[in-house]
Amino acid sequence: MTESFFISKLLNQVGEFSSFENFYSKLTDFYKSENKFYEISAAKCSELDWPSGIGVYVVRAREGMDVVYIGMTGKVQRMAPDSVKLEIKKNGFKNRSKRWHPYCFSEKGRYENHFEFGPNFGVNELKKQDEEVRYKYHLPISGLVIDCFSLDEQSAMAPTFLESLILQVYFSSNGTLPVANNVL
């Protein structure tokens, strides 16, 4: 079954899922069957072994299904007036470790090896602040897992679409967004 066909089937069933967990289980099972699913975890942020490429990632509790953040990397881009393609960046996922707004995988300071989110300052002021006061929330990386859904040119799917689908089902099931997500 192609990825597009599978997602089309999921879309037709979105209202029928009894819970986010049920939907998420079907999604992960499909991506595992296509060898496009990676579950990463580590005791230290610097040891997170992100896959190559682009796609969607879900930061969640190691135990259970408490989702903290749903994000994406990569985009569909116009290359020429008559050419549009999925832009594949080798370090797309890997660059998530270097991100500092609106979240951070901290590798130093008081919150070393924590996933931090809820910035206390705007994007232009955040890096000027002491590391201890940049974010409201700090979760030890050792208690988290990051699920990565890898997309490639054969996927014919924009990362924003898959991210939005996962967020929409989460919102529909829970009446809220994951704690570190601010918009859908």
Image (cartoon, grey):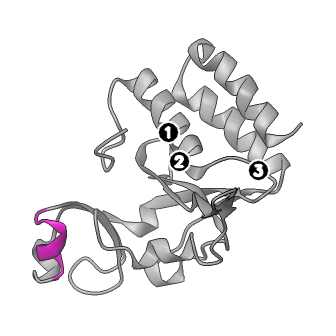
CA separation, marks 1 and 3?
A: 16 Å
Magenta span of residues: 120-127
Callout 2: 10 Å neighbours few (<14), some, many (20+)? some
Quarter of the picture containing the C terminus is top left
CA separation, marks 2 and 1?
A: 6 Å
Q: Is residue 121 inside the magenta stretch? A: yes
- In the picture as drawn, the residue positioned furthest to the bottom comes out as 108
Do the CB atoms of the residues marked 2 and 1 lie less than 8 Å apart?
A: yes
Q: Residue 50, position in %: x, y?
A: 60, 73
Q: Residue at x 69, y 56 (%)?
A: 82
Residue type at the position of mark 2: Thr
Q: Residue 39, position in %: x, y?
A: 64, 60
Q: Residue at x 86, y 40 (%)?
A: 2
Sequence-first tag of 3 and 2: 3
Q: Residue 91, position in %: x, y?
A: 59, 78
Residue sitting nearer the eye, 42 or 131: 131
Q: Is residue 31 inside the magenta stretch? A: no
Residue type at the position of mark 1: Ser
Sequence-first tag of 1 and 3: 3
Q: Residue 65, position in %: x, y?
A: 50, 41
Provide the residue designation for mark 3.
155
Tell me where residue 130 sits by quadrant. bottom left
Residue type at the position of mark 3: Ser
Please tell me whether residue 152 is drawn above or below residue 123 in the rendered image: above
- In the picture as drawn, the residue positioned furthest to the front comes out as 81
Quarter of the picture containing the N terminus is top right
Provide the residue designation for mark 2.
160
Provide the residue designation for mark 1.
164
Q: Residue at x 61, y 36 (%)?
A: 24
Do the CB atoms of the residues marked 3 and 2 lie less than 8 Å apart?
A: no
